[in-house]
Image: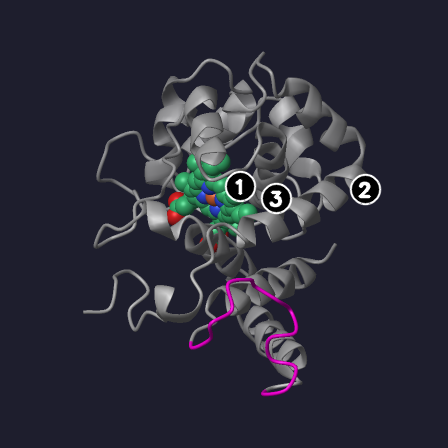
Amino acid sequence: MASSMIISFALLACTLYLINGTSSTQLTPKFYSQSCPKVFEVVQSVVHAAVAKERRMGASLLRLHFHDCFVNEEETPKPPTFPPPTSSLNNLTTTFQAVGLSTNEMVALTGAHNIGKAQCINFRVRVYNESNIDPLFAVIRQSHCPPSTGSGDNNLAPLDVRTPARFDNLYYKNLIRQQGLLHSDQQLHSGGSTDSLMEQYGREPVSFKIDFAAAIVKMGDIRPLTGADGEIRRNCRVVNS
Ligand code: HEM
C-alpha cells in the first residue's frame, strides 16, 4: 500500500473528525455529499501535491491523525509525544485500552512506524544503553546521535531501517531482529504477549494491511465530537479561547 493511499485515508478520517455545525452524533463518509461532492478528490490531490513536494509529509500527516484521535487525552498547551517512547508494553496496552483499542489493534497501528523519522532525543537511551538491540544497528544509529543530552537532539533517523519511505511490513521484521529504533516499538517484540502477532505481520503483509486499515478507521471513530460538542481549532495545539 503506497504511503499516499494511507494518508488519503488518514486525512479522510481527520476531515470527518473536524465536522462541525451539525446535530449528527455519528461520523459519516457522506457528510459532504451535497455541500462538497468532490471532497475526496480535492483532499487526495492536495495530499499528493504535498507529499510530492516533501516526502516526509505523508508520515507527518499520519502521525497527526494519531494525535488528533487521542486529542482528549492531551489537553495540555503543548502536546507531548504521548504516549511517550519510553513506555513499557504494559503502559502502551493500558493507554490504547483506555480509548477502546485492543492490544492487537495497537500492534497493527504501530505498523505506521513503517514510514517517517524520529529525533535523536527520542532514541538516544535505547541506542546507547539498552541490551535488546542489534549491536551493529546501535552503532549505526549512534553515529548520528551523540551520547550527551543537548548535543544533536534533533538529528533524525528513519523508524524503518530498511524501507524508510515505503509503507510495507518490514517494521515488524526489523523488530524481530532487534532493530527497533524506539524503546516502545521494541517492547512489542521483547518476549511478551505481542510477539506472536508481530511475527505474523512480519510473515503476512496482507494480513497486516487488512488489520491496519480496520484499526485506523476505528481509531478515527474514538469519541468524535460533533455539532456543538466540538470545535475546529484555530491553533491545533490548544482549545480555542
Ligand atoms: C504505540 C504508541 C506510540 C508511540 C510511543 C509513538 C511514538 C512516536 C515517536 C517518539 C515518534 C518520533 C517523533 C520525533 O522524534 O519527532 C513517532 C513518529 C511517528 N509516529 Fe508514532 N508512536 C506511537 C503510535 C503511533 C501510531 C498509532 C501512529 C499512527 C497510526 C503513529 C505514527 C507515527 C508516524 C507516521 C511517525 C513519523 C512522523 C514523521 O516522520 O514526521 N505512531 N512516534
Extreme residue in the left direction: 241
Q: How many marks?
A: 3
Using the numbered discs, state the Cα–Cα distance from disc 3 to disc 1 in whole angstroms: 7 Å
The residue labelled by disc 1 is: 159
Quadrant housing residue 174: top right
Quick one: quadrant of the N terminus? bottom right
The residue labelled by disc 3 is: 114
Residue visible at 65% across and 58% down in the picture: 6
Label 2 SS: helix
Secondary structure mostly seen in the magenta stretch: loop
Provide the residue span drawn in magenta: 21-35
Residue visible at 37% across and 52% down in the picture: 71
First along the sequence among labels 3 and 2? 3
Residue situated in front as seen by the camera: 157 or 232? 232
- Can you give x and y, in whole percent of width and height, for residue 31 in the image? 60, 75
The residue labelled by disc 2 is: 206
Quick check: marks 3 and 2 in contact, CB under 8 Å? Answer: no
Colouring used for the render: one colour
Extreme residue in the bottom direction: 35
User: How busy is the neighbourhood of tag 3: few (under 14 within 10 Å), some, or many (20 plus)?
Assistant: many
- Can you give x and y, in whole percent of width and height, for residue 63 in the image? 48, 52
Q: Is residue 50 above or below residue 67?
A: below
Quick check: marks 1 and 2 in contact, CB under 8 Å? Answer: no
Quick one: quadrant of the C terminus? bottom left
- Can you give x and y, in whole percent of width and height, for residue 209 in the image? 74, 45
Q: Amino acid at mark 1?
A: Leu
Q: Amino acid at mark 3?
A: Asn
Q: Amino acid at mark 2?
A: Val
Question: Which of the two discs, 3 and 2, sits closer to the camera?
Answer: 2
Question: Would the CB of label 3 be found within 8 Å of ligand 1?
Answer: no
